[in-house]
Amino acid sequence: MESNAFIIQLLEEKGGEIQGRVQLQKLVYFCKAMGVDVNANYKLYIYGPYSQQVANALQDCVADNILTESDGVIGKGVNYDIFLNDIVKSENKLSDISKKIVKDILGLCNQMTTKQLEITATTFFIDRQQKVLFGDDDKEAVIRKVSNAKGKRFNHNEIETSYQTVMEEFFPLEQKYAISG
């Protein structure tokens, strides 16, 4: 699914507003990580997992008056409803399983501040990387790498808390969709 189509549908599910670019990046990241087929490749960057495709899609949607960006809030633009209707009629609409993933991700992430989303997404990214690339499930290695990446912006307790959140909330969600997807 194209990034712009997914962003529009995510915004619709979110109630019409997303609190800034960092939140948008993390919501799309978590949805993709759980199995939503969205055209977005992520790498670790300043504020955690970052996708240039998502950034470009947002810019394009703002330029086309599909979305607005004002005071850090991403909202509906003049052409939003037209674009959303076109998506619903195309193959770019969310599948039933993708809708469930989005709902679950929003349920977990809506309670988090942007800063909490940043550290949790970073921890999840590094934990998955440890498991996939190195076959390593070592908590201390993950904590050390997150601390190396984020230690200037987050203290040890915040990093530990993010690891617990990943293990207790995001990892079970990943397992849920790995089995059903």
Image (spheres, rainbow, N blue to C red):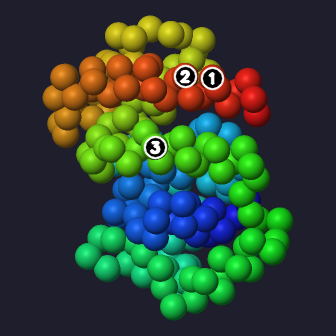
Residue type at mark 1? Gln
Q: Position of residue 64 (x, y in %)?
A: 56, 88
Q: Nearer the viewer, mark 3 or mark 2?
A: 3
Residue type at mark 3? Gly
Q: Is residue 32 left or right of residue 181?
A: left
The image quadrant that residue 123 belongs to is: top left
Q: Which quadrant, please, contains the N terminus? A: bottom right
Q: CA distance from mark 3 to mark 1?
A: 17 Å
Q: CA distance from mark 3 to mark 2?
A: 14 Å
Q: Is residue 120 left or right of residue 29?
A: left
Residue drawn at (31%, 44%) of the image: 112
Q: Which residue is mark 3?
A: 107
Q: Nearer the viewer, mark 3 or mark 1?
A: 3
The image quadrant that residue 31 belongs to is: top right
SS state under label 3: helix
Residue drawn at (38%, 78%) of the image: 69
Q: Is residue 54 left or right of residue 176?
A: left
Q: Nearer the viewer, residue 168 or 49?
A: 168
SS state under label 2: helix
Q: Which residue is mark 2?
A: 172
Asked whether disc 1 touches disc 2, contact meaning CB atoms under 8 Å apart, the reply is yes
Q: Nearer the viewer, residue 34 or 58?
A: 34
Q: Which residue is mark 1?
A: 175
Q: Earlier in the sequence, mark 3 or mark 1?
A: 3
Q: Position of residue 149 (x, y in %)?
A: 31, 33
Q: Earlier in the sequence, mark 3 or mark 2?
A: 3
